[in-house]
Amino acid sequence: MECDVLVIGCGPAGLAAAGYSARAGYSVIAIDSLAPGGQLLYIHEIENYPGAGSMSGYALAESFEKQAASFGVRIEFMEAKSITKEGSTFIVTTDSDAIRAKAVIFASGARHRHLGCPGEEEYQGKGVSYCATCDGPFFKGKSIAVVGGGDTALTDALYLSRIGREVHLIHRRDEFRGQKALQDRVRAAGNIILHMNRNVLSINGNGKTVSSLTLTSGEELPADAAFIFVGITPNSELLEGFAELSGGFVVTDSGMRTSVPGLFAAGDVRDTPFRQVVTAAGDGALAAHSADEYIQSLKA
């Protein structure tokens, strides 16, 4: 298989990149081992994607896919296994074929680390969330639990404290790992209750929504939602030893260019301070623009 632009990953970043590249007149193949949509498929409801109103993550993912296909993007279900570059041509082997491309846009996303406790998977999208800005507004005036002790957990606990009635911040150690300035703000907040040296044993509910968390201290903590921030893992294994990574995340410049000419990265897999559907789509558009410039430079 051959194409001008190969996109690895069919989440918002990948499908946006694929669509922009196809509209620019390039032949585009977008591959993913799962259904198009990425993390969108696990979001019960999304209301902050500009112009889309309130809709399910699945519906928004379907819209991304249909639009990309309408521009001529060829979407294939296959998993990338290796990537090499011979001269100006990239060769990506997959579990079913090898694809040759002039430029590659890497948008494989990242996966949230989970607690692994009973109830976490059952109530995902029903009170269990990994994104405060996505789902926090659905719990206005309610009791919210936050699990974690790093910068993200502290920052999002503060954000959720402005929305919820109270925030229970649960951390497995006796000290937070986040910045001291954030720690000071958390401790100064009037409605953030700290639960240190605690782990979550289970997340409980009525089958439809979260109602409480059971902690290792033996207490059952009433809560309407559980936001889990114990880290994310980028899906960047394919680029190890091939492109520059930082903490597993792909390093890019402002144009989504990586350390390898012709290879671009977009979305959650890259080193970025903010991970949202809208920023992922923006990354994809920028990556497509830079890929266009790169391919044109090959003709010079």
Image (spheres, grey):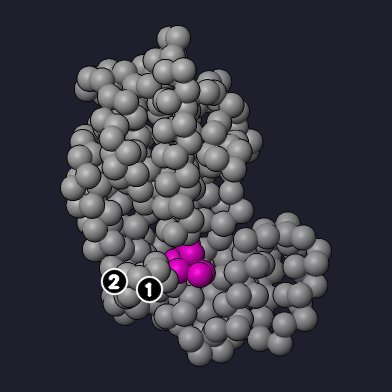
Dot label at residue 47: 1
Q: Are marks 1 and 2 in contact (CB under 8 Å)?
A: yes
Q: Residue at x 47, y 44 (%)?
A: 286
Q: Residue at x 46, y 17 (%)?
A: 300
Q: Nearer the viewer, residue 216 or 189?
A: 189
Quadrant of residue 247 within the rendered picture: top right
The residue carrying pointer 1 sits among few (fewer than 14), some (14 to 19) or many (20 or more) residues within 10 Å by Cα, namely some
Q: Nearer the viewer, residue 143 or 73?
A: 73
Q: Nearer the viewer, residue 67 or 211?
A: 67
> Label 1 vs label 2: CA separation?
6 Å
Q: Amino acid at mark 1?
A: Glu
Would you place residue 56 above or below residue 285 in this image? below
Q: Amino acid at mark 2?
A: Met
Residue stretch rendered in magenta on the structure: 129-134
Q: Which residue is mark 2?
A: 55
Residue 222 seen in render: no
Q: Earlier in the sequence, mark 1 or mark 2?
A: 1
Would you place residue 168 above or below residue 272 in this image? below
Would you place residue 184 above or below residue 299 in this image? below
